[in-house]
Image (cartoon, rainbow, N blue to C red):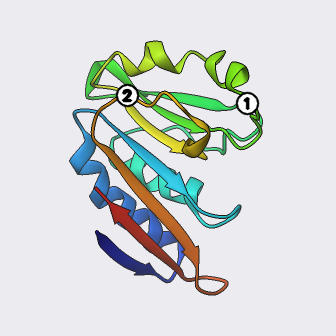
Amino acid sequence: MRKFITNSAEETQQLAAKLSQEFKNGGIITLDGPLGAGKTTFVAGFAKELGIKSKILSPTYILMRQYDLPYEKQAKLFHIDLYRLEDKQEIDSIGLNELFLNPKNIFLIEWAEKLTNLPKTKITKIQFEYLNDTSRQIIITD
């Protein structure tokens, strides 16, 4: 377990950029924390470090956003937000099982506890906690 305190959105993005280097060859990261805790800010720093130039927006209303990885033509980064989904059929309908088949894909999943069928692979869990208006505690469990 690794614990960090960030005192700004920029520091959260810098932490994400460092962590992204561990996932260049694919992986699954779950992001847990209250609304507005910095999960999308984290994803933005992560994606930028991987060379993704697109503006990173929360996928809350569309469930999933995908981004091409400029260094790996056979894989993508997926930012998934399951907050609005309630039942297993809704979750199954977005087709994650097929996306998980490519081990080079990178997944950043918010509200992942709603998934019952995560692959039996290493999953990194990141917990975001409010400390105050600008500071967050970020706990990474491998």
- Name the image quarter holding residue 77: top left
Quarter of the image with the C terminus is bottom left
Q: Is residue 104 left or right of residue 11?
A: left
**Where residue 119 is drawn, which disc sits there?**
2
Q: Amino acid type of disc 2?
A: Pro
Estimate how packed mark 1 is, as few (under 14), some (14 to 19) or many (20 or more) residues with alpha carbons within 10 Å.
few
Residue 98 in picture, x, y percent from top left = 45, 12
Residue drawn 74% across and 34% down?
85
Residue 1 in picture, x, y percent from top left = 28, 68
**CB of mark 1 within 8 Å of CB of mark 2?**
no
Q: Amino acid type of disc 1?
A: Ile
Q: Secondary structure at mark 1?
A: loop
Residue drawn 51% across and 53% down?
31
- In the picture shown, does residue 128 fall above or below 23? below
- Name the image quarter holding residue 89: top right
Residue drawn 44% across and 55% down?
45
- In the picture shown, does residue 120 fall above or below 81? above
| Nearest to the observer: residue 116 or residue 14 | 116
Give the CA distance from mark 1 to mark 2.
23 Å
Q: Is residue 103 left or right of residue 138?
A: left
Residue 6 in picture, x, y percent from top left = 45, 79
- Name the image quarter holding residue 94: top right
- Closest to the camera, between mark 1 and mark 2, is 2
Total numbered circles:
2
Disc 1: which residue: 62
Q: Secondary structure at mark 2?
A: loop
| Nearest to the observer: residue 55 or residue 33 | 33
| Nearest to the observer: residue 3 or residue 66 | 3
Q: Earlier in the sequence, mark 1 or mark 2?
A: 1
- In the picture shown, does residue 6 fall above or below 20? below
**Where residue 41 is drawn, which disc sits there?**
none
